[in-house]
Amino acid sequence: MTNNQSEQYLNLRKKSVPQGPANMTPAIISHASGAVMTDVDGREFIDFAGGIGVNNVGHCHPKVVAAIKSQAEKLIHSCFHVGMYESYIKLATKLNDLAPGDFEKMTMFANSGAEAVENAVKIARYATKRPAIICFENGFHGRTLLTMTLTSKVKPYKLGFGPYAPEIYRMPYPYCYRCPFGLEYPKCNTHCADHLEDFFITNVAAESTAAVIVEPIQGEGGFVTPPQEYFPKLANICKKHGILLILDEVQAGAGRTGKMYAIEHWGVVPDMITQAKSLAGGMPLSAVTGRKELMDIPHIGGLGGTYSGNPVSCSAALAVLEILFEDRLLDRAKELGEVLQKRFLELQKSYEIIGDVRGKGPMLGLELVRDRKTKEPASDEAKKLTKLCYDKGLILLSCGNFGNVIRTLMPFVITNEQLDKGLNILEESLKELTK
């Protein structure tokens, strides 16, 4: 293929691949390094999407590549159930040490974020002997039958794919910018957390509830970030009723917010944590880490899968952890967060279309609105903005129930020059969009 290979691949894609797997940009990527992706025609893009939060340590980090090569030369697959291997056991031990909580923990591995959530729910139900799971509006937990049911947004994730899994109950999330209770923070006294007690009366009994599963910062839901008092209140109510608290850190974990786990910002210790995405630097891997007494309850053979905890993926994850801590990338993430927060608040002052700036560290969202008083979502404008940025060489994604939130998921290894260039492209595009 020569001369505009992108167009030729796009035509072949239309012919060979169904429309269901959506494409957020028309880019056909040939290779990537750090925070820059290059397409088959040689065009470079600054990457503010990070493979949807997968490339926290950057594309093709040399240490990750070296770990993959080294492991692939020795053992690609044996199936952990058939022949155990070092990387699985070492990685589980490290994640047990890293997860919040001054108690013994255990970790099991799967392939995707959805699988991690499925397994966490299985463990919770097995341990508590209760059927019900409480999740949240705007939440996203995956695309399998159970995780699609847990996911809030109907289009495109659920439409036409029912019936859904039973015993799933959904309550409002602390979305302060669009409070579902019509209240105002902090006068509300985080009523959204206290509402769980009312929820037990009107939706599902506490005695029937195995777990509450929640994202510390909602990913696909629009980077919605709870106030500081929220999670401590929620955790106390769960503990009072013997309900397990599961934190879905699939997108927010692995340092994305400047801490290894986003829930650390709230000082809360969950019973289980699910993670995936950036955990293995681009290799498919997910994990469930939790209290030993919970994780070890399911019977032998009750958990697992053929590819779960693949040795190459586990080796890549061990390299990612080394990079995050030994190369001080968590400190870099905090620096990025400070730069982005300052710049975004300045943009908010200059552009009326930016209604809200929220998030933690470099996991930040800009909610676009047509009117700051009515907060009418600027959904079409968000699409136009990401297209304008793409045309200028910046890959940026939108999210949220209305598709009106611009989110930042750039690799932590992005250089200051690349970051500044990307932010300038964003500002130029905002100016062009609103002129």
Image: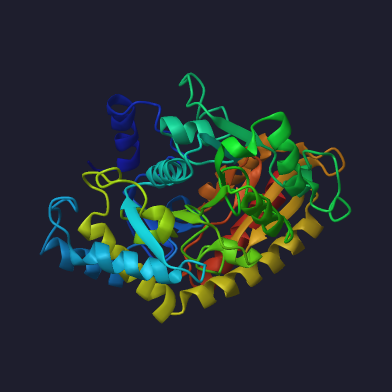
Q: Nearer the viewer, residue 58 or 260?
A: 260
User: Which residue shows up at 72% across the image and 29% down it?
Assistant: 202
Relative height, residue 324 to residue 268 (above, below): below
Relative height, residue 240 to residue 279 (above, below): above
User: Which residue shows up at 77% across the image and 42% down it?
Assistant: 178
Q: Nearer the viewer, residue 392 or 20?
A: 20
Q: Quadrant of residue 434?
A: top right
Q: Quadrant of the N terminus?
A: top left
Relative height, residue 189 to residue 362 (above, below): above
Point out residue 158 in the picture as x, y percentages from the top left corner: 51, 26
- Please, which colouring scheme is shown? rainbow
User: Which residue shows up at 57% across the image and 27% down it?
Assistant: 154
Residue 73 relative to residue 333: left or right: left
**Can residue 340 be spotted in the picture?**
yes
Q: Quadrant of residue 27?
A: top left
Q: Nearer the viewer, residue 44 or 395?
A: 395
Point out residue 244 in the picture as x, y percentages from the top left corner: 54, 49
Residue 295 relative to residue 248: left or right: left
Residue 61 relative to residue 428: left or right: left
Q: Quadrant of residue 424?
A: bottom right
